[in-house]
Structures are given as C-alpha cells and as structure tokens.
Image (cartoon, rainbow, N blue to C red):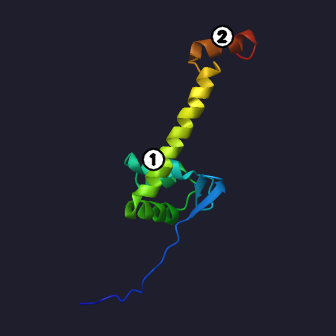
Amino acid sequence: MTTVDLEPLTVAVPLREDAPGVYRVGDSRVLLELVLDAFNRGESPEGIVRSYRTLALADVYAVISRYLADPDPFDEYLRGCDEEADAIRRQVEAAGMAGEISKDELLARARAKGLCP
C-alpha cells in the first residue's frame, strides 16, 4: 500500500473588500452573496463558474470551504445584504418608482416613439 505524506496546506480565502462592506470573490467583480446564494440553492462550484465566467474554480471552492467551516459570519453578512436590499426596495416603492410594466406597454411606448413597427 502506498501512502502520501502531505504537508499542511493553508489556503487564503480569495475575498476582497471593494467598497466598504462589499465583498468580491478572487480577482473578479462577482459579489460574495451571489456565489453563496447560488451554492445555497444547490448549484455546484462548477455550475457557479459556468454562470460567472470571470470566477476561478479554485476561488469558488475556497470560499465555499471557508463558508462550510464556519457559516455564521457569512450568514450575518448575507442577512445584512438582505436588509439593505429591503431598505432600498422600500425607498424605491415609496418614491413611486416601482411597478410592473407589461411587455405590451413597453411595445406601445416604443411604437409611439417610432422605435419599432
């Protein structure tokens, strides 16, 4: 039987803070929350890289490994992202800028401007 003698390996978690409180994965512009949300929806690391082609597979595995080892700080970060998104959504709705616009209405507007037949 063959044995493999491996030295302990330390892998840095490839996260960088782009703006205060905004974390991106590796050298990409992909947000940490997008990677974690995809993983939590059942997406594989390979699938995540297919969805976000600027990501490196090793970076995604490193982030997910760190997340699985201690999810609490990541879950707290995700809760903060959700709270911020909810606050912005409420501001947009309060300003009357939110609303469903149907495809038919968009086409009618484009026809009125002569942009489509």
Question: Is residue 117 something that shows in the picture?
Answer: no
Q: Which mark is residue 37?
A: 1
Give the vertical position of 28 relative to 5 (above or below). Answer: above
Tell me the amino acid under the disc marked 1: Asp
Crowding at mark 1 (Cα within 10 Å: few <14, some 14-19, many 20+): few
Type of residue at label 2?
Answer: Ala
Q: Residue at coordinates 61% horizontally, 61% vertically from top-left?
A: 16
Q: Is residue 54 above or below residue 116?
A: below
Residue at point 40% right, 57% down?
A: 71
Q: Residue 68, how many percent across, how many down?
A: 38, 61
Q: Residue furthest left?
A: 1
Q: Is residue 102 above or below residue 38?
A: above
In the displayed structure image, the side of residue 59 where residue 111 appears, left or right: right
Upstream in the sequence, badge 1 or badge 2? 1
- How many labels sit on residues? 2
Asked whether the viewer can see residue 102, the reply is: yes
Quadrant of the rendered structure where residue 23 is?
bottom right
Residue contact between numbered discs 1 and 2, judged by CB atoms under 8 Å:
no
Q: Secondary structure at mark 2?
A: helix
- What is the C-alpha distance between the residues marked 1 and 2? 36 Å
Quadrant containing the N terminus is: bottom left
Q: Residue 35: where, in percent of width, then height?
A: 49, 51
Q: Secondary structure at mark 1?
A: helix
